[in-house]
Image (spheres, helix red, strand yellow):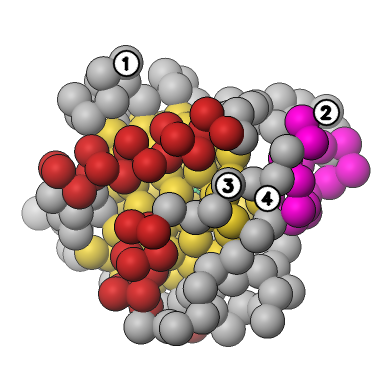
Amino acid sequence: MSEPLKIAGFEIFKGCLDSSEQAALVSDLRAVARAAPMRHPVTRRGKQMTVKMTSAGRVGWISDQDGYRYEQRHPDGMGWPPIPKRILELWQNITNFERQPDCCLINFYGEGARMGLHQDNDEGDFSYPVLSVSLGDDGLFRMGGPERGDKTRSIWLSSGDVTVMGGSARLAYHGVDRIRFGSSSLLPDGGRINITLRVVQD
Ligand code: SIN
Ligand code: MN
């Protein structure tokens, strides 16, 4: 049996959301994606990411040839929809912070999508944690340390799992190596959704 993953500041709440809570979140997120369509961002070097993204909140995270940043508008020009109430309640229940997150970044992983090792460091304030929710297919999450070359450990995240990266894990490198496409029946066409809640500016 593998040892449990224990990294200071990194918390995993396995099975935090039951199937009806997961389905309710998916329907909230579909409404967000109808108002602010998902798109495959490109990196500064012009390479298309395999993950599709959109955001809800005061600001949304974007990437294009000018780099990574938060913007008040979707690249198509519309404002970002508000963060759904259920998601704000989850943030409050898990983190105990009154301060609401500014951004709910929504990632969609279709078959073959992945996310390379990176830090969440485009925010102006790292004192708040990043809360993340996994929905749909299992994803192999890789967690490292504050330096790119630090040792990493991998863990499968499943639908309904919630993680928190705070304290000394707030700036830890992390990524998603692959998903097990079709492993969950939550999304009828398969795939994995991950949402991350971030306080961007204090
Ligand atoms: C992210 O780091 O933005 C996404 C992490 C995940 O998909 O679990
Ligand atoms: Mn990240």
Give the vertical position of 133 relative to 112 (above or below): below
Q: Nearer the viewer, residue 11 or 129?
A: 129
Residue 82, given in percent of the width and then of the height, sits at 54, 53
Q: Nearer the viewer, residue 38 or 124?
A: 38
- Could you tell me if residue 61 is visible in this image? yes
Residue 175, given in percent of the width and then of the height, sits at 50, 48
- Measured in 3D between alpha carbons, the distance from the residue under mark 1 to the one under mark 2, in whole angstroms, is 28 Å
Q: Is mark 1 within 8 Å of ligand 1?
A: no
Residue annotated with mark 2 = 46
Whether the residues at callouts 1 and 3 have beta carbons within 8 Å, the answer is: no
Q: Secondary structure at mark 1?
A: loop
Q: Nearer the viewer, residue 152 or 29?
A: 29
Classify mark 2: residues with Cα within 10 Å, few (<14), some (14-19) or many (20+).
Answer: few
- Measured in 3D between alpha carbons, the distance from the residue under mark 4 to the one under mark 1, in whole angstroms, is 26 Å
- Measured in 3D between alpha carbons, the distance from the residue under mark 2 to the one under mark 3, in whole angstroms, is 27 Å
Q: Nearer the viewer, mark 4 or mark 3?
A: 3
Q: Which mark is first along the chain, 3 or 4?
A: 4
- Amino acid type at image mark 3: Pro
Q: Quadrant of the N terminus?
A: bottom left
Residue 178: mark in rendering: none
Classify mark 4: residues with Cα within 10 Å, few (<14), some (14-19) or many (20+).
Answer: many
Whether the residues at callouts 2 and 3 have beta carbons within 8 Å, the answer is: no
Q: Secondary structure at mark 4?
A: strand
Q: Residue at x 73, y 38 (%)?
A: 78
Span shown in magenta: 61-77
- Amino acid type at image mark 2: Gly
Residue annotated with mark 4 = 61
Residue annotated with mark 1 = 189
- Amino acid type at image mark 4: Trp
Q: Is mark 3 within 8 Å of ligand 1?
A: no
Q: Nearer the viewer, mark 4 or mark 2?
A: 4
- Measured in 3D between alpha carbons, the distance from the residue under mark 4 to the one under mark 2, in whole angstroms, is 17 Å
